[in-house]
Amino acid sequence: MGGGSRALSLSSLCATTLAAARAPAPFLAPAHAHRAPPLLRLAAAMSSSSSNPTPAASGDAAAPAPAPAPSNAIDFLTLCYRLKTTKRAGWVKRGVQGPESVADHMYRMGVMALVAADLPGVDRDRCVKMAIVHDIAEAIVGDITPSDNVPKEEKSRMEKEALDHMCELLGGGPRGSASRRNCYSCETKNAFYRAQEIRELWTEYENNASLEAKVVKDFDKIEMILQALEYEKEQGRDLEEFFQSTAGKFQTDIGKAWAAEIASRRKPK
């Protein structure tokens, strides 16, 4: 997929995903679905759910306050289900059998943050949270890889738009919007602040803007090469390109140390 406009809006895609999860139906694939097999089922549901309202306000100042938090939370989690069914595209393209999902990848990154040694000036809890939200927008846009030739700026724009829709769905409208001004109930306020936290964690990671972001970006690469090592051993594959893609790019001492340990466990070529 290139940097052109998409035929389907993200709000429509959100509504379709939720409708499809609640009532199984054929799916219609978005424009970039060739990269992630679970997204290949997206289009018949798009037409069948055209009468469904979008799950969140588009940011219009006149939009009503978010629905009660339990309803928002379940809709948000239903959308996150796609993270469990979207396979990591790099492995799919290399013909890896039974490739991990995006959720698999984020989960082990969260465990990495949990078990890592204490690092000076680094908030461990923030790293755990950042690890489990850093790819959350892929629930809508799928796993976009460098080989898809989507410009970095366009990829970031697509993912930010998807994230904004997800945060609005959870109950966190744009800053200063009617969603915030009308947050009267405790439940709605909590939903708003949780959504804002997710947005801020994702943005911090995307911009590599803190020590925690640097650590988690290293964990992102570490998880990938550890998974590559495991696939090499399990399936007899040569996945050298994944190791080469991370060489010299680790920003932290823990990233460098863990990468060296993984490299030491590979069989000599």
Image (cartoon, rainbow, N blue to C red):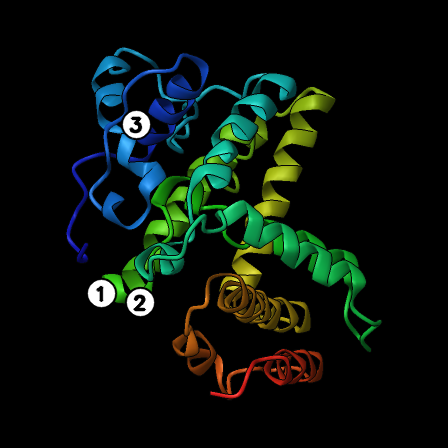
Which mark identifies residue 179? Answer: none
Q: Amino acid at mark 2?
A: Pro
Near mark 2 (Cα within 10 A), the count class, few <14, some 14-19 or many ≥20, is: few
Q: Secondary structure at mark 3?
A: helix
Q: Residue at x 40, y 57 (%)?
A: 96
Instruction: Return the residue at label 2.
Output: 146
Sequence-first tag of 3 and 2 = 3
Q: Is residue 49 above or below residue 147?
A: above
Q: Secondary structure at mark 1?
A: loop
Mark 1 and mark 2: span between their CA atoms? 6 Å
Q: Is residue 193 above or below residue 244?
A: above
Question: Do residues under tags 1 and 2 come within 8 Å of each other at their CB atoms?
Answer: yes
Question: Do residues under tags 3 and 2 come within 8 Å of each other at their CB atoms?
Answer: no
Q: Residue at x 24, y 16 (%)?
A: 50
Q: Is residue 130 visible?
A: no
Residue 243 position, x and y percent, is 47, 79
Instruction: Return the residue at label 1.
Output: 149
Residue toward you, 191 or 32:
32
Given this view, does label 1 or label 3 mark the residue nearer the observer? 1
Mark 1 and mark 3: span between their CA atoms? 25 Å
Q: Amino acid at mark 1?
A: Asn
Left or right: 232 in relation to 126: left
Which mark identifies residue 12? Answer: 3
Sequence-first tag of 1 and 3 = 3
Q: Residue at x 45, y 48 (%)?
A: 98
Q: Is residue 266 above or below residue 237?
A: below
Left or right: 117 in relation to 265: right
Left or right: 20 in relation to 147: right
Residue 106 position, x and y percent, is 58, 52
